[in-house]
Image (spheres, rainbow, N blue to C red):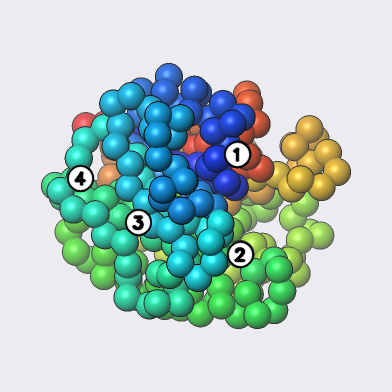
Amino acid sequence: MRVVSFNANGLRSAANKGFFEWFSKQQADVLCVQETKAQEHQLAGPAFLPDGYKAWFRDATTKKGYSGVAVYSRREPDEVRTALGWEAFDEEGRYLEARFGNLSVVSFYIPSGSSGEMRQDFKFKVMDWLAPIFQEWLKSGRDYVLCGDWNIVRSRMDIKNWTSNQKNSGCLPAERDWLNGLCVEEGGWVDAYRALNPEGQDYTWWSNRGAARANNVGWRIDYQVVTPSLRNKLKACSIYTGERFSDHAPFTVDYAE
């Protein structure tokens, strides 16, 4: 099974830059998109739907052209879920779950706090609210693949400028402690990239300021976080930087069947 996660920073923009031409060659089973920045009707038509796939969307209702997540799949899910039960989070279009038998593939978009104190406070509230939900999922006996932009780095290996970003959203100690607390060694969630690349220093996002991407001054904030039951099924992963579809790069993970 091959799963791709990609923050498009506007799926119409990414499509215009050739994203779906690239994706159609990847032989992926599932694609999870974050930041569609569109309403579902704006993403209809062959330009946004590669042959052999169906798509499901969860748009933001609080503000059009904001946030939004999508799941593309070759196989029809048994069930699609679009809400976790907190309106402030759900209506921003940040969660979409496709269920295939005992497997759940989730497109997640954790809020950023970089725009100011109010959004950072909301981010912390989201983190506190999600923690018991993640624990329930761990105990459920289901296999989960949580794809998406978490807007948090885990360690020094996941960001180029570690020291200078200690007071910036996405690298705050409390944020890192929360994410690392989920990914504990015994019985916790598994960061697919880190499990496959214990010493890897690759990035998935680069600021549009300056020449961050050209100089590889990046952050690893896009993940596939999986239940421990899938740890031994992790085969390989890759971050595609050959073309620039967004300020994020597509992140692909291969799982053994």
Element at label 4: loop
How far apart marks 3 and 2 lie (CA) works out to: 18 Å
Residue under label 3: 96
Residue under label 2: 112
- Foreground mark, 4 or 1, reads 1
Q: Which sits earlier in the primary sequence, circle 2 or circle 4?
A: 4
Q: How far across and how far down the image is residue 200, in percent?
A: 58, 38
How far apart marks 4 and 1 lie (CA) works out to: 27 Å
How far apart marks 1 and 3 lie (CA) works out to: 21 Å
* Other-residue count near label 2 (Cα within 10 Å), few / some / many at <14 / 14–19 / ≥20: some
**Looking at the image, can residue 74 be seen?**
yes
* Other-residue count near label 3 (Cα within 10 Å), few / some / many at <14 / 14–19 / ≥20: many
Q: How far across and how far down the image is residue 162, in percent?
A: 74, 55
Residue under label 4: 77
Q: Which sits earlier in the primary sequence, circle 4 or circle 1?
A: 1
Q: How far across and how far down the image is residue 45, in percent?
A: 40, 34
144 left or right, relative to 121: left
Residue at the extreme top of the image, as rendered: 25
Which mark is drawn over residue 13? 1
**Looking at the image, can residue 147 be seen?**
no
Residue 232 vertical position relative to residue 156 in the rendered view, above or below: above
- Foreground mark, 2 or 4, reads 4
Q: Which quadrant does the N terminus fall into? A: top left
Badge 4 amino acid: Pro
Q: Which sits earlier in the primary sequence, circle 1 or circle 2?
A: 1
